[in-house]
Amino acid sequence: MQSTIQSSEHPTGTQSKSFVLAAMRGDKGGQLTILAILAAVVLIPLANTVLPTGHPLHVETFTISLMGKYLSYAMLALAVDLVWGYLGILSLGHGAFFALGGYAMGMYLMRQIGDRGVYGNPILPDFMVFLNWQELPWFWHGFDQFWFACLMVVLVPGALAMYLVIWHSVREFQGCICQ
């Protein structure tokens, strides 16, 4: 069986291994957009860390965090738009996966407050102290490390998605046998 997506031939005679690069080869607007995005990804953090606060091109930390929030919402909107626009399916499941990732990052941020919180407890987040919890739950351990939180932002929604796919596949397979 032959693949429907074939690698395209470059004018120099070499084959492109990436479908995206092959598709954008003649698209100057797409190439400029990708170049602008890459420049922004590099230059905006540099404008925050390298340039002094009084410099006109300095970007405040609040602005960078706000841009990150806007970009994460834009990715969610793009995912819903692609599923709804191309497939005609209104998928509200995106919100569940987005919320799980946001909850994992929120767990990391709550652990980072430490003793600067209202109750001054270095181990428990403020809401746990308010609820009179005595120790940190087992699933909160590790969320004081950024790398662990980033890993959980990806793995927890991914594990839920894998579970749902397997559950749906088994259910569909059993439905075929039973009928």
Image: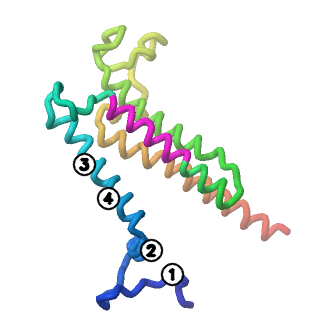
Q: Which mark is residue 35?
A: 4
Discs 4/3, front:
4
Query: From mark 3 to mark 2, how far is it between C-alphas?
Result: 25 Å
Asked if disc 1 and disc 4 are in contact, CB closer than 8 Å, the reply is no
Query: Please, what is the dominant secondary structure of the magenta stretch?
Result: helix
Quadrant of the rendering where the N terminus is positioned:
bottom right
- Name which residue lies at 25% across and 48% down: 42
- Name which residue lies at 26% across and 41% down: 44
Residue at the disc numbered 1: 5
Observer-nearest of 60 and 72: 60
Magenta stretch: includes residue 140: no
> Residue type at mark 3?
Val
172 versus 51 height, above or below: below
- 87 with respect to 76 (left or right): right
Residue 167 in view of the camera: yes
In primary-sequence order, the first of circles 4 and 3 is 4
Which SS class for mark 4?
helix
Query: From mark 1 to mark 4, how far is it between C-alphas?
Result: 25 Å
Residue at the disc numbered 3: 42
Q: Which mark is residue 23?
A: 2
Observer-nearest of 79 and 129: 79
Query: From mark 3 to mark 1, how far is it between C-alphas?
Result: 32 Å
Give the quadrant of residue 69.
top left
- Name which residue lies at 42% across and 83% down: 7
The percent coordinates of residue 59 (x first, y second) are: 26, 33
